[in-house]
Amino acid sequence: MNNNILEIEGLQVKVFDKTILDNINLELESGQNWFIFGPNGSGKSSLLKAIMGIPPYRVTAGSIRFMGEEITGMGVDERSKQGIILGYQHPPELQGIKLSHMLKICLGKGKDDDFSEDELEMIDRFNLTQFLDRDANVGFSGGERKRAEMLQIMFLKPKLILLDEPDSGVDVDSLRLLAREIQRYLKTTGASALVITHKGDILDYIEADHACVIIDGMNHCYPDPKRIYEEIRVRGYDHCLDCADRVKEVLS
Amino acid sequence: MKKESLMDIPHAILEEAMKTGVNVSEDETSGVFFHVDQSTIYSKVGTAFMDQVEMMDTKDALKKYPWLEEYRWQLVDPEKDEYTKAVHEEWSGGYFMRIKKGAKVTFPLQSCLMITGDKSEQKVHNIIIAEEGSDCNILTTCAQHSGAQEAAHYGISEIYVKKGAKLTFTMVHHWAEDTKVRPRTAIRIDDDAEFVSNYICMSPAKDVQMFPKAVCSGENSKAVFNSILYVQEGNWMDIGSWAVLKGNNSNTELNTRAICRKNSTLISRGTIEGNSDKCRGHLECRGLLLDDEAVLEAIPILRATKMGAELSHEAAVGKLNEGEITYLMSRKLSEDQAIGILIRGFMDVSIMGLSPAIKEEIDKIVDLVADAS
């Protein structure tokens, strides 16, 4: 048996009749972290949602295996219980559900259970103590929403974290805080992460092994994330397409 | 026959009243009033509050205070409909509450109107006067003893909130499945005064129709209507609130949360009239349908007659948001658990400042609904 936490092979994903992703292949070793780059609308978020099993993203071909087990037939709740957790880019506002309640759900606690001292300390580290009695995400700023989302993920103790643009809409200080906490979690637990980003700053905090670029619903190249990011920053995604075409030519 | 002590009231009646949030401990209320079927059986103000409030049967109050006639049938027109006409012709009493000038009443005044007899009609006329600068919470409950069948309740309530006063009026309806309910309520709110209505109807009633009208006649006057409704099998409810903004800088908020299921109908109305050069009103109705057998109709009406009236509304009816269900499922919850939590969240009434007893009773019913879904 190999040491892969996630294996995606020939994956095709459709939303209703429209093909969003085609022939995605990816092998993530246990303990590895990958960044995913790609222009807007290329299918990055769709890939994470398909891995999580979020409707209406439907796998129409290929397979997704988590720790050796095929998961494409599983519901969102089963996948989360297996240890796959998606950090939403835009978590919904939950009227009438306090942030404290959401955090307790993530911890597997009852609504009336107390937080432990360690948990309270972590809530404080995420600057969320004063938000505990507020409805989750209702009226939260972008940064507050992201901090609340990330803390829930930490409390869920995932084996594989899927992060959809954790750096969008957050200020420099919040980004540093969040990225360091993610890195600390990954390092101490040996969990893996797939992280979508458009920015380079987060690469300074989260140690990643590989990166892939998704363009037009297909993924390309897997070398050093910082090098890929620098290429994209300087030469744009068009260069990635040229590069991919050259690779195809060589292979054919 | 009038009782001298709460302990003299039959246990079955007290128990039924407690279900609706009535606190029968005299230490924690400023006064308690019971009108059962056709007579007032108990009316007592706590010793510590005697300088602050007066409470008695309306018929007794009219004998004691001839001036009270100036408040009777002033806000509600006796010719309005067959129910007002019926009460005008014949009535069995009701409560008169007077919160005296400047009194800050720390414990709630409680009234319970109850029907225990089969096929009986209860016709009452209530008058509340919150005098200048007073502040009081009133908890009024209308209940039917579980043994009574095919009853009807017609209640006229005229409420006066005078200059600088604040009155919070919480009404809990706890009718049985075959009761016909026709409350007719009107409120006048003077300068710098505030009226807050919390209406809670979570138990089945065959047929309820009510549309209380608050007139913000004073400068800086305010009216708030919060309604929590659970409409279930065989119920028909046509419920709304109506705010008229006449005073300069008057304002209103109308909030409704409703859950409907199984062969029931809810018509949720809300009307705000902006008749002042400077006034504000917002209406919010959120309704949740738990299956395809119920009907939920939201009818918001905004009517402005002055340019300076700022009126708005939000109305949303439908099922639970699929995206929110999935989000909760991505937190290791099953679909059923996610739906239950969202229903409880939808009916969260913590902002209304209700008493723990009422809140607990609402929570119990919401839990039953959530678990059954």
Image: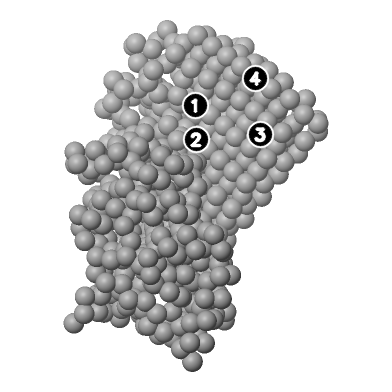
**Callout 2: chain:** B
Residue at 44%, 46% in the rendered image: A145
Distance between the Cα atoms at labels 1 and 3? 19 Å
**Callout 3: chain:** B
> For residue B198, which numbered disc appears in the image?
2
The residue furthest bottom is A252
* Sequence order check, earlier mark of 2 and 3: 2
Residue that carries the numbered disc 3 in the rendered image: B281
| Amino acid bearing label 4 | Asn
> For residue B168, which numbered disc appears in the image?
1
* Sequence order check, earlier mark of 4 and 2: 2
Residue that carries the numbered disc 4 in the rendered image: B220
| Amino acid bearing label 3 | Gly
Residue at 53%, 29% in the rendered image: B196
Neighbour tally class for label 3: few under 14, some 14-19, many 20 plus, Cα within 10 Å: many
Marks 4 & 1 on one chain: yes
Marks 2 & 3 on one chain: yes
Q: Nearer the viewer, residue B163 or B69?
A: B163
- Check disc 4 and report its element: helix, strand or loop: loop
| Amino acid bearing label 2 | Asn
